[in-house]
Image (cartoon, rainbow, N blue to C red):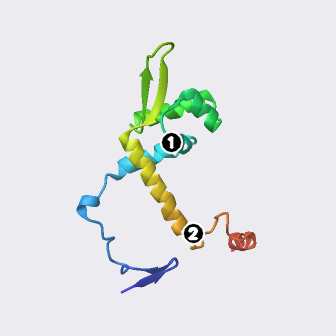
Amino acid sequence: MKSTDATGPSEWPDNAACPVLATQLVNWSEVAAVIETLSLKWALPVLMGLGYGAMRHSELSHALRIDNKQLSRILRRLQEAHIVARSASASRGPVQVRYHLTPSGRNLVAILAELGDWRRDGQDEMVPGRADVDPALRRSMRST
């Protein structure tokens, strides 16, 4: 039986639980911690930059046009979350420090890419406040 609400038809009756296997249940506080880290202003651009491969601090700073203090803060937080790792190589000359995604960081970037795909697949649905919503419609929605 399908039920309906303000958002449209649902596949489950109103009193049905969402069909999630016990093995799929997660510790939501851990998910919240990841979301909090990702919500930092420059976290996603840094992850996307490192998705192309290891980079030096100055390369990231120039590519993203972010000041060194901000970048250092974000990299430190991403390292604490085990999303980004720092490696130093001492070849001839000064030590070169490079940042790269950890295996879990690469998995996270893949999940974020899937999230983007999911969002693009849902663009046919009209979502209030989205940039592509007709401005006249948006004004009328605010006045109600």
- Residue 91 vs 58, above or below: the answer is above
The residue positioned 39% from the left and 50% from the top of the image is: 31
Amino acid under label 1? Tyr
**At numbered mark 1, what does the secondary structure look like: helix, strand or loop?**
loop
- Residue 36 vs 67, above or below: the answer is below
Q: Quadrant of the N terminus?
A: bottom left
The residue positioned 39% from the left and 38% from the top of the image is: 102
Reading the chain from its start, which is encountered first: label 1 or label 2?
A: 1
Q: Residue furthest front?
A: 92
Q: Which residue is mark 1?
A: 52
Binning the other alpha carbons within 10 Å of mark 1 as few (below 14), some (14 to 19) or many (20 upward) gives few
Name the side, left or right, on which 59 lies relative to 38. Answer: right
Name the side, left or right, on which 34 lies relative to 40. Answer: left
The residue positioned 52% from the left and 78% from the top of the image is: 6
Q: Is residue 66 visible?
A: no
- Residue 109 vs 22, above or below: the answer is above
In front of the other: 134 or 57: 57
Amino acid under label 2? Gln
Q: For residue 143, what is the image quadrant?
A: bottom right
The residue positioned 41% from the left and 33% from the top of the image is: 80
**At numbered mark 2, what does the secondary structure look like: helix, strand or loop?**
loop
The nearer-to-camera label among 1 and 2 is: 1
Q: For residue 2, what is the image quadrant?
A: bottom left
Q: Residue furthest top?
A: 93
Q: Position of residue 64 (x, y in %)?
A: 62, 38
Q: Which residue is mark 2?
A: 123
Q: Is residue 90 visible?
A: yes
Name the side, left or right, on which 37 lies relative to 45. Answer: left
What's the CA distance linking mark 1 and mark 2?
27 Å
